[in-house]
Image (tube, rainbow, N blue to C red):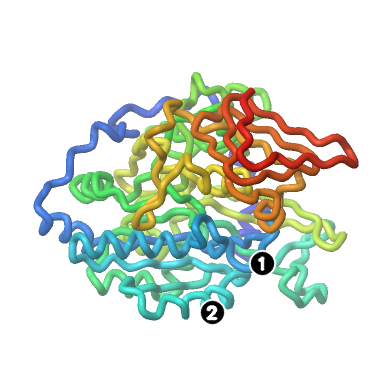
Amino acid sequence: LSLFERYLQEKANVIQWDKIKSPTDKEVVPYDDLPAVPEDPAVVKALLSKLAVMKLNGGLGTTMGCTGPKSVIEVRNGQTFLDLILKQIETLNAKYGSSVPLVLMDSFNTHDDTLKILEKYTDSAVKIKYFNQSQYPRVVADDNTPWPAKGRKDKAAWYPPGHGDVFPALCNSGVLDQLLAEGIEYVFLANADNLGATVDLRILNFIVQNNNEYCLEVTPKTLADVKGGTIINYDGKLQLLEIAQVAPEHVSEFKSIDKFKIFNTNNIWLNLAAIKRLVESDALKLDIIPNPKVVDGVEVLQLETAAGAAMKFFDRAIGVNVPRSRFLPVKATSDLLLVQSDLYTVQDGLVTRNPARTSATNPTIDLGPEFKKVADFQRRFKAIPSIIELDSLKVSGDVSFGENVTLKGKVAVEAPKDDKIVVADGTVLEG
């Protein structure tokens, strides 16, 4: 209710363009400038004793044709996102004798399924905590009435209000106080589907030494990332600038990779005591993101917030400009093709780029709608092709691939309407 009242009262937060300043290297620190972590394992163990890993686990796999939480989609060799995340933390804890826990923020859409899935990990060496984010009623657009008040009683009447809700939800759940009582001071928050979001000791060491309450990882922007948020200095404070805050006449400049060279990975390091302070004082007035939708023929409005927008409220907030390897999201089957291919290797849950790839960038993958669902993707690839030397791939129509296929250069495979193409076993396609 308070979010909707604020939405009605506040004017859209459009940034005054002439007040924007680029952040300095002290405000957004280049990763290579971070000091090395002390080699003493006892020092590292002490650092890790302050940390919990938190994953945003509220999303469903529906866009990829899957039911249930997205985190249980099989990513590679039968392992799900959750399998890989737990293996990463297990390996870290075993190496340093630490006990970093995993915290999952579920939504009402994923919670029940997640509880069933977690039964699989009852013998895991990693302590797992979980909590639900809030659920808000969708508002019917024509009269601003909450949909449940108009008689809609099922799940469709409600929505999870974005990952900016992590702050109040973590406090209200009691999990924040549990973590503080266990001596944990920081959480590393990331999307469950970002395979590059692993614990980085250099970042953790830096923010602990400098008492930074908030650290947002950014990475160099490419043409594929032009809509992503970026860090700016505005009125003397760092904040995230999103495309929704940009006036239409400045959108092309915002998308430029010359002026705004970095974008938000949504990997965020947060001080728990600071979260508690800001939530309890009701200071986190995050920018509201209106998200109009049509559900079952009814125009509704859902108001959301993003965790990145909290940056300006924390003391000593910084960014760190990290390597692109820390941003490896799987949003579609085209991303699955990349991470399942020989472009990456997996060891101890860590997904690492194959050094045999000489290009600094990944190939661009454009798979037609026939590949959108994971089940169709799996059916159409008998085995994932070798793409070490691939620049781009565009596939459209009724196409399927055999085993031991190699793709090089710029490859396009297009099946004419009412026709089918099968790329035979052992084929090398080079464009």
Which quadrant is the C terminus positioned in?
A: top right
Residue 188 lies in quadrant:
bottom left
Residue under label 1? 67
Which quadrant is the N terminus positioned in?
A: bottom right
Residue type at mark 1 is Thr
> In the shown orientation, is residue 123 left or right of residue 77?
left
Foreground residue among 353 and 35: 353
Residue 327, percent from left and from top = 45, 42
Label 2: how many Cα within 10 Å (few below 14, some 14–19, many 20+): few
Could you tell me how far apart the alpha carbons at marks 2 and 1 are, in whole angstroms?
14 Å
Q: Earlier in the sequence, mark 2 or mark 1?
A: 1
Residue pictured at 54% horizontal, 35% vertical? 387
Foreground residue among 227 and 195: 195
Foreground residue among 16 and 388: 388
Foreground residue among 318 and 125: 125
Residue 66, percent from left and from top = 66, 62
